Amino acid sequence: MSGPNTDYDPVEVTPLKAEEVERMRDEALAAISAAADLDELKQARLDHAGDRSGLALANREIGALPPQARKEAGQRIGQARGAVNKALAARQAVLEVEHEERMLVTETVDVTLPTDRGRRGSRHPITLQSELIADIFVAMGWEIAEGPVVEAEWLNFDALNLGPDHPARTMQDTFWTEPAENHVVLRTQTSPVQARTMLTRTPPIYVACPGRVFRTDEYDATHSPMFHQVEGLVVDEGITMAHLKGSLDHLAAQLFGPGIDTRFRPSYFPFTEPSAEVDVRCFVCRGEDSDSCRTCKGEGWIEWGGCGVVNPRVLVACGVDPEVYSGFAFGMGIDRSFMFRHALGDLRPLFEGDARFSSAFGTEI
Ligand code: DAH
């Protein structure tokens, strides 16, 4: 036997009958238009256009037809499958748009709603600055000492050679607490921590005392009734002004950059003798083109604090033998140091608690 079976009756191949093809096509089109979402459409595609769908199976039967019947059947099936694929694509496009619109509605985020997530806090720049300064001293082997901000008048003044009638008492405008006969003040300086340390310990003493101090100053760009100081005190055998200078040079270099040194100008403090004001080299112009420098205002130097060799009268008042020991002390403003380190023209933001200011300098916790 050879050659095609010309007696083959296409009518016998049921899946290829015109009515059957039409029925399968209509069934497919109905399923496609009934698909309500992309999942249902996927199922309709599998059922009516997949490899095992009626139309696909019918398509496979074409090869078995005699040549003269193939063309007509092929056309019929091809048209039906084409119509199904077109309907699938059209429905797919419609359902995708619908799907996207639904997502946009259900997943909408109202960005105007108040958030219930708290802002992350950040540490206050002055706290960080104080800790940085404390770390510099600790790295030199010094200890950190603290004292109360509500302080005995005697420790804030008398023990530091500032007796009741001493004219220098008026240098620091003092907040007194009531009743006055208790002689309690808000400490005007961190220097009473010197007295507290010497009264409770024996030399050698190497301490730094950062903390808050209070004065009845008007609140303006460069003054605040509450500010911060750091005090340094060394009491040991053979301590001289040279040790003071070396320690301050080291602190300046650590805080403001290598090569930043300090200079002394003669001054007066009742608790030191001799006394000096200490200036720090302007870390912006370094004294080289100071005329146009906004940080030091043409000086080449920035006023930093007070210092000196501990007055023997203070050593005696605090129970330290001045025949054996000598010491140096210094005190400077932490806020001031911070201001010129960051070229701030106004210190008020440091005290107003706006977290946006603090977090610009602070480290997030
Ligand atoms: N307590 C001084 C002030 O507030 C600063 C000061 C000056 C502290 C000299 C010292 C010092 O320890 O030796 O103005």
Image (cartoon, helix red, strand yellow):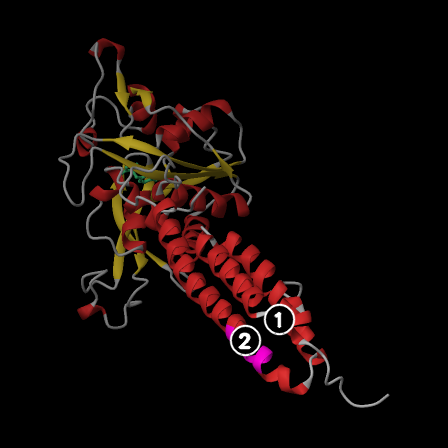
Spot occupied by residue 33 in the image (x, y as percentages of width and height): 44, 56
- 250 or 138: nearer the viewer: 138
For mark 1, does the 10 Å Cα neighbourhood hold few (<14), some (14 to 19), or many (20 or more) residues? many
The disc, 1 or 2, on the residue closer to the chain's N-terminal end is 1
Q: Position of residue 345 (x, y in %)?
A: 20, 52
Kind of residue indicated by mark 1: Leu
In front of the other: 72 or 104: 72
Q: Which mark is residue 16?
A: 1
Looking at the image, residue 321 lies above or below residue 240: above
- Residue 263 visible in rendering: yes
Residue stretch rendered in magenta on the structure? 72-79
Q: Specify the quadrant that holds the C terminus.
A: top left
Mark 1 vs 2: CB contact within 8 A: yes
Kindly report the secondary structure that dominates the magenta region of the rendered protein. helix
Q: Is residue 77 magenta?
A: yes
Q: Which residue is mark 2?
A: 76
The residue carrying pointer 2 sits among few (fewer than 14), some (14 to 19) or many (20 or more) residues within 10 Å by Cα, namely some
Q: Residue 156 in the image: x percent, y percent?
A: 31, 25
Q: Is residue 275 visible?
A: no
